[in-house]
Image: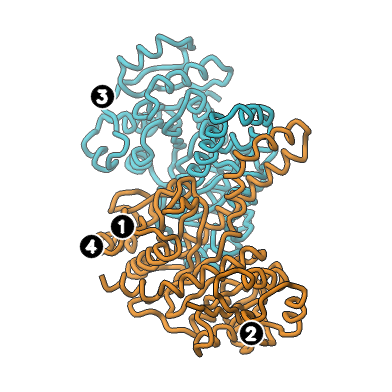
Chain colours: A orange, B cyan
Amino acid sequence: MSVTVALDAMGSDAGPAAVVEGVAQLSREDVDVHVLLVGDEPQLSTLLAEQRYDASRIAVVHASQVVGMGKKPNEELDAKLDASVLVAASLVKQGQADALVSAGSTGGVVLAAARTFERLPGIRRAALAAVYPTELRHGPRDDPFALMLDVGATLNCSAEDLVGFAVMGSAYSRIVSDIGQPKVALLSNGTEASKGTPAIVEAHQRLLEMPGVNFQGNVEGLDIPRGTVDVIVCEGFLGNVVLKMLEGVSEVVSDIARDAYARKFVWKVGLTMLSQGLRQIRTMTDWKQYGGAPVLGFDHVVIKAHGRSNARAVRNALKVAAKAVRRDLAGEIARGLSD
Amino acid sequence: MSVTVALDAMGSDAGPAAVVEGVAQLSREDVDVHVLLVGDEPQLSTLLAEQRYDASRIAVVHASQVVGMGKKPNEELDAKLDASVLVAASLVKQGQADALVSAGSTGGVVLAAARTFERLPGIRRAALAAVYPTELRHGPRDDPFALMLDVGATLNCSAEDLVGFAVMGSAYSRIVSDIGQPKVALLSNGTEASKGTPAIVEAHQRLLEMPGVNFQGNVEGLDIPRGTVDVIVCEGFLGNVVLKMLEGVSEVVSDIARDAYARKFVWKVGLTMLSQGLRQIRTMTDWKQYGGAPVLGFDHVVIKAHGRSNARAVRNALKVAAKAVRRDLAGEIARGLSD
């Protein structure tokens, strides 16, 4: 099945060159993914001309504006009706593409999706999910990653929202990570069913009664890096703080390793000898290249490629989007909710 | 000034032996701290007899019961009126001791303090604060630590509670870490004043108007391990998850290092060569030995020594408690609130 992805190529920290490189790479692989490259046409065409690519699989669609990083996305979208992310979303809405992938600002893509697409029946609020590195491995491919949602789309959540996130995270993990019955848990301040905010306590009770979700109860902060479960569910405020903290820890570990490397010959030798052992720590600091963050809850597949996306991350985000389309993510979520 | 500390010696994971060892150590130092060692008298006296100690500085006070770890502290305290933590708190209340230190369960000491002591004027809710390791260093001693509160005493907080925590954390940091004007920030999902829950947004505005607090605005998850500020303020639910996650990250890093060490000769050599470079990472995994967690908001100094406390951690918790008494922590908080 051929899949077409509308790719918002603008607004990434790394610039459109890395995005175009990733698209060109993918076009040369045997994957049957077509890409509508949305953004400044002259710039994108010039960048594309510098790459080897399969021209039958890439088309450039012009959009004259870009949602700026660090600005208020609501105001940006109000003012910029020809913003690349809105144009890309419209292509999906109109059926010219099957999925939206954006390398631009997170707020921009979440809001563009909310303005353009419908929410899935039974889903009141969208969620932004993040794949993050864990000590334990997951699924048939032994992935050293787990999924956490929401990490920032919906700051405060009702019990119903959390239940919806559990169903969506479970469906995404089944489809993208090939885990048959993903273990799902609520993030709380204790494992007992009585622990947490009222919304968490209520969601806990409701999830116990849902046969379609392999609900493991509550997990605590300790379980995040360990990776006790495949899918961690929390409200967006908490998920945002936790995810940024994981990034911070990664940076600190990198800094320490880099410092050690720079400082002394004996440490350089030590680090070189340790290269295999350090790979696991490096995974923690580098995990962003391994794909994108799905925006879940809409009737179309939406993936946010990471802000500092390199070519490989863009290619992976496109592949993940195509997989989610082929395996009918929206249908899988709907089935999870109807159980 | 001589300070007397009532020390609840029971209920720690490590058992009373490590607690007694720490007390004995401190008694041999030139610090003028007296300890009332509260718990099972025969057991404590036997343990004490095995140590070298200054008998003029240690007295054993019998308590026949212990608050169990992992049980509901409210029910435990209702049922066990002779629990060591309640007896120790009473000694402080009656003026026989100046501060309460407990090696037992966190819930037990927070509740025993709430039942026995008065809250400080202007403080509606108590906070449990935690010292945690950071990349950046703090204060005149270049401590690689910062303070975070609340980490679990008050799950959901009003703006007023958060402001109180900021004042208390600032006072504690001034007194215990000797930082003249500790940098204080609210933990949120963005640095802008508009970011966060309504309580955070309101607390932000109020803290801007308090000259006694060196308020730096909001920080994000990234800033926790980096240590951008000296004191991070958040509600207890969030702080609990974040602190346990830091512990989890520490354990994962330890596990990886231990695995690497066990696996191959070349890695052993590498790790040994790196020992100085790894010390900084080890600090992150070992930080619990560096003192206790203050319970703030009461009219007496209360310190929770960590559950897996070793002798050194107990000794340090006693020294911190004595310092907080000598420098009048309660008065410092009251002055902060009246500014």
The chain holding disc 4 is A
**Location of residue B187 in the rendering, given as x and y in whole percent from the top left corner:** 54, 57
Dot 1 or dot 2: first in sequence order is: 2
Say if mark 1 contacts mark 4, CB within 8 Å: no
Dot 1 or dot 4: first in sequence order is: 4
Q: Nearer the viewer, residue B10 or A106?
A: A106
Read off the residue under disc 2: A83
The chain holding disc 1 is A
**Location of residue B110 in the rendering, given as x and y in whole percent from the top left corner:** 38, 41
Read off the residue under disc 1: A215
Going by the numbered disc 4, the residue's amino acid type is: Glu
**Location of residue A120 in the rendering, given as x and y in whole percent from the top left corner:** 38, 79
Height in image: B182 above or below B24?
below
- Res B141 quadrant in image: top right
Say if mark 1 contacts mark 3, CB within 8 Å: no
Specify the label residue B64 is tagged with. Answer: 3
- Report whether mark 1 lies on the same chain as mark 3: no
Going by the numbered disc 3, the residue's amino acid type is: Ser
Q: Marks 1/2: CA distance?
A: 40 Å
Height in image: A303 above or below B109?
below
Q: Marks 2/4: CA distance?
A: 44 Å
Residue found at x 40% / y 60%: A233
Read off the residue under disc 4: A209
Q: Marks 3/4: CA distance?
A: 44 Å
Q: Is label 3 or label 4 in front? A: 4
Going by the numbered disc 1, the residue's amino acid type is: Phe
Residue A19 shown left or right of residue A293 in the figure = right
